[in-house]
Each structure stands twice: as structure tokens, then as C-alpha cells.
């Protein structure tokens, strides 16, 4: 009897552990940092803001000069000038990738992905190393990006 109780306890503990670990490992409901990095690396069908011109850092930007690209879903929300109209929002599944530059080389990918009406934020080195995990408190990003909420947290349109 004692063995059955001990076995039951460990079985329940194992079920709880794996259920909780699954929830903790995928709080976005879809992504891991690795998967989001891979999605950001696939630029097929993406459109660059201002034809891929390297834009200078503006304001207090921590990213330096950069190029910005949109996946087709995000691009569909832009107007004829290639900008999100004031007061509009990007649809779910929108992906924005800021390629921070050092000369002509990308030294950081700052990624925004729209899921269930909210942005997921992350940063990666070109080799895929996570610099800012999508599981981290996004206030490090939103504290700056919230200065222009009328463009769905995207500051580029107001600064360039």
C-alpha cells in the first residue's frame, strides 16, 4: 500500500512538472526564441521600409543605424507611403524586423511579432544568440516604443 501511495505521489508530481514546464517554455502560445529567430531570418516576401535604405539612429535609440523590414501580413497594413496610418494597428501575425547595422553588416535583429493583439519583443545576434528573450518583461522595449502608441508602438514612421 505504501508503495502505491509513493508511486501515485511521484506520478502526480511528474504530470504537474511536465504540464507546468510546457506552459513556462511556451508562454507566447506558439514561439520559442529559436523559432522566432528562424522566422525573422526568413525574409522571403518581406518588404523593406524606404527600399532598404540604412536609416540613422534617431532620438535615444539603442539600436543605432538600421534597416526595417515587414512580412507580407505587416506590409498589408501600410498605406501608399509605406507607413502605418496614425491610429491604425498591425494585424495578428505581423512581423517587423529591425536589422541594426555596423557599417553594412547586421549586428543585431530586433524583432516584433504581433500575437493576439499584443506585441512579442525579442533581440538576437546574427548567430541566433538571444540578447533579449521574448519571455522577458517587455517594459525594456515598450518604455521607449510607447512614446508613439498611435502607430502601434512603431517609432520609425514618426522619426524617419
Image (cartoon, rainbow, N blue to C red):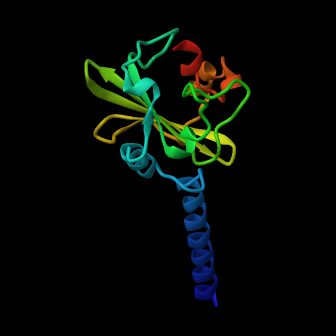
82 relative to 77, above or below: above
Give x and y (percent) for residue 105.
Answer: 26, 26
Residue nearest the viewer, comparing 67 with 9: 67
Give x and y (percent) for residue 4.
Answer: 61, 87
Q: Quadrant of residue 110?
A: top left
92 relative to 17, above or below: above
Quadrant showing the N terminus: bottom right
Which residue occupies the extreme left position in the image? 104
Give x and y (percent) for residue 102.
Answer: 28, 19
Residue nearest the viewer, comparing 86 with 17: 86
Q: Quadrant of residue 125?
A: top left
Which residue occupies the extreme right position in the image? 87
| 96 lies left or right of 20 | left
Q: Residue at x 56, y 45 (%)?
A: 73
Q: Quadrant of residue 15?
A: bottom right
Give x and y (percent) for residue 70.
Answer: 49, 37
56 relative to 53, above or below: above
Q: Residue at x 42, y 20 (%)?
A: 63
Which residue occupies the extreme bottom position in the image? 1
Residue nearest the viewer, comparing 60 with 13: 60
Residue nearest the viewer, comparing 85 with 95: 85
Amino acid at each position: 500500500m505504501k508503495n502505491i501511495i509513493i508511486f501515485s505521489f511521484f506520478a502526480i508530481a511528474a504530470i504537474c512538472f511536465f504540464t507546468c514546464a510546457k506552459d513556462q517554455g511556451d508562454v507566447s502560445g506558439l514561439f520559442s526564441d529559436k523559432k522566432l529567430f528562424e522566422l525573422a531570418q526568413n525574409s522571403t516576401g518581406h518588404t523593406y521600409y524606404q527600399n532598404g535604405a540604412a536609416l540613422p539612429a534617431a532620438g535615444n535609440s539603442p539600436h543605432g543605424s538600421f534597416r526595417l523590414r515587414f512580412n507580407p501580413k505587416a506590409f498589408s497594413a501600410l498605406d501608399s507611403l509605406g507607413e502605418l496610418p496614425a491610429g491604425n494597428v498591425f494585424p495578428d501575425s505581423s512581423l517587423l524586423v529591425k536589422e541594426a547595422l555596423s557599417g553594412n553588416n547586421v549586428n543585431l535583429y530586433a524583432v516584433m511579432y504581433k500575437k493576439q493583439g499584443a506585441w512579442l519583443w525579442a533581440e538576437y545576434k546574427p548567430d541566433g544568440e538571444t540578447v533579449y528573450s521574448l519571455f522577458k518583461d517587455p517594459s525594456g522595449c515598450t518604455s521607449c516604443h510607447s512614446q508613439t502608441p498611435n502607430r502601434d508602438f512603431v517609432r520609425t514612421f514618426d522619426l524617419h
